[in-house]
Image: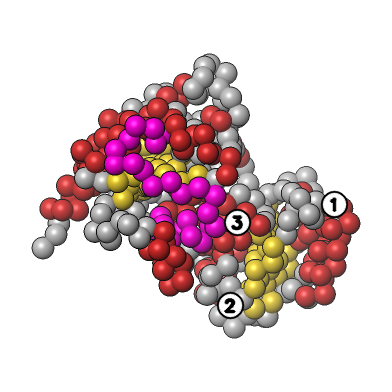
């Protein structure tokens, strides 16, 4: 690029996890263009991921699933983007709606992923082959590389503000700061990505004896029954985090010593806030994240009823619970947590 842009827009209106990965793209863009105004366009469910990023100047919330789902609302947003006169738009969400918004911005430089509509919507493209999807962060950084720029992966980062830390401490007011907390993330929008509830309960039940830890279970409004099933009979009683704002969830995750979760956004949010040790469970999906120690992927390691691309499926063709996820044993998960504890303790001075 010959001239440094003054206004940049990054579009990612997908799931929470997708926007967590896009934080790396925001950081890279800021390093390249320190004086530019950088905006992010996200959905309401993911706004809390980027709202407190100091490398962002503006967060635009697009409620595409509800209040702004109509064509008229999309065209109105497109008009706003044109009026904002962006020099560069980076579209990290491979959907037609996001591509159309990129086109409607009329920015002179528009980068996105190769697709049927790519030639019409984008000026620059890069690959998005789901049969061999590259590392989630690298796939986003490739949008900058498509512009001929050199960038490096600096990881995913979601800040936790002092205000949210105070609210988290207030939420945990009966829990001493010295108490080790094990976070569990049992939910997922996709059925074949869920580890069975009874296996989460087995980990929760053994947490106090094997880790001297109390459990904190995270879920959304739709997970009331799931969280109750996991918590049933567990002692000491788990702390239930249900339907809380994403910024508060991030602060609570940062209080945990370990997190065990499905391949879902909150598990990656735990890594992004600097949680020490995250275990992500994989069955029907690809492992598209570089897990640096002490984080770890725990995989089924057996055939799956569907190709390990995309989101998986809502139900397993071979059985219920999903055969691949059901093959992961609680003892293996607990052993990985115990090993981290022993290594961490042995390294203390």
Q: Disc 1 marks which residue?
A: 70
Give x and y (percent) for residue 274: 38, 60
Residue at disc 2, secondary structure:
loop
Is residue 59 something that shows in the picture? Answer: yes
Q: Quadrant of residue 13?
A: bottom right
Mark drawn on residue 257? none
Q: Which of marks 3 and 1 is nearer the N terminus?
A: 3
Q: Disc 3 marks which residue?
A: 46
Whether residue 306 sits left or right of residue 6 in the image: it is left
Q: Disc 2 marks which residue?
A: 33
x 66%, y 57%: residue = 44
Q: Is residue 214 above or below residue 98?
A: above
Q: Mark 2, residues whose alpha carbon is within 10 Å: few (<14), some, or many (≥20)?
A: some
Q: Which of marks 1 and 2 is nearer the N terminus?
A: 2
Give x and y (percent) for residue 129: 62, 42
Residue at disc 3, secondary structure:
helix
The magenta stretch is 230-254
């Amino acid at each position: 690029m010959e001239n440094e842009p003054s206004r940049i827009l990054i579009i990612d209106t997908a799931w929470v996890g997708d926007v967590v990965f896009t934080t790396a793209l925001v950081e890279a863009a800021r390093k390249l263009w320190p004086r530019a105004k950088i905006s992010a366009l996200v959905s309401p469910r993911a706004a809390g991921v980027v709202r407190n990023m100091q490398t962002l100047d503006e967060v635009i919330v697009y409620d595409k699933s509800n209040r702004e789902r109509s064509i008229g609302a999309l065209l109105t947003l497109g008009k706003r983007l044109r009026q904002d006169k962006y020099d560069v738009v980076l579209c990290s969400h491979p959907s037609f709606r996001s591509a159309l918004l990129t086109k409607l911005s009329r920015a002179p430089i528009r980068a996105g992923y190769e697709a049927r509509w790519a030639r019409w919507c984008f000026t620059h493209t890069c690959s998005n082959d789901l049969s061999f999807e590259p590392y989630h962060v690298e796939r986003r950084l490739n949008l900058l590389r498509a512009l001929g720029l050199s960038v490096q992966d600096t990881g995913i980062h979601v800040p936790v503000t002092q205000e949210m830390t105070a609210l988290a401490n207030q939420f945990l007011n009966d829990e001493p700061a010295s108490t080790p907390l094990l976070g569990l993330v049992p939910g997922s929008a996709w059925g074949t990505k869920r580890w069975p509830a009874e296996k989460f309960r087995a980990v929760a039940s053994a947490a106090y004896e094997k880790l001297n830890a109390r459990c904190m279970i995270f879920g959304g409004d739709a997970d009331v029954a799931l969280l109750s099933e996991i918590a049933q009979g567990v002692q000491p009683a788990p702390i239930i985090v249900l339907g809380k704002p994403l910024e508060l969830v991030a602060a609570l995750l940062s209080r945990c010593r370990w997190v065990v979760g499905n391949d879902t956004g909150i598990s990656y949010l735990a890594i992004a806030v600097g949680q020490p040790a995250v275990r992500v469970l994989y069955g029907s999906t690809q492992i598209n994240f570089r897990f640096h120690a002490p984080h770890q992927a725990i995989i089924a390691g057996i055939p799956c009823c569907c190709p390990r691309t995309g989101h998986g499926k809502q139900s397993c063709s071979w059985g219920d619970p999903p055969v691949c996820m059901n093959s992961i044993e609680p003892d293996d998960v607990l052993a990985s947590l115990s090993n981290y504890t022993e290594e961490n303790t042995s390294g203390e001075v």
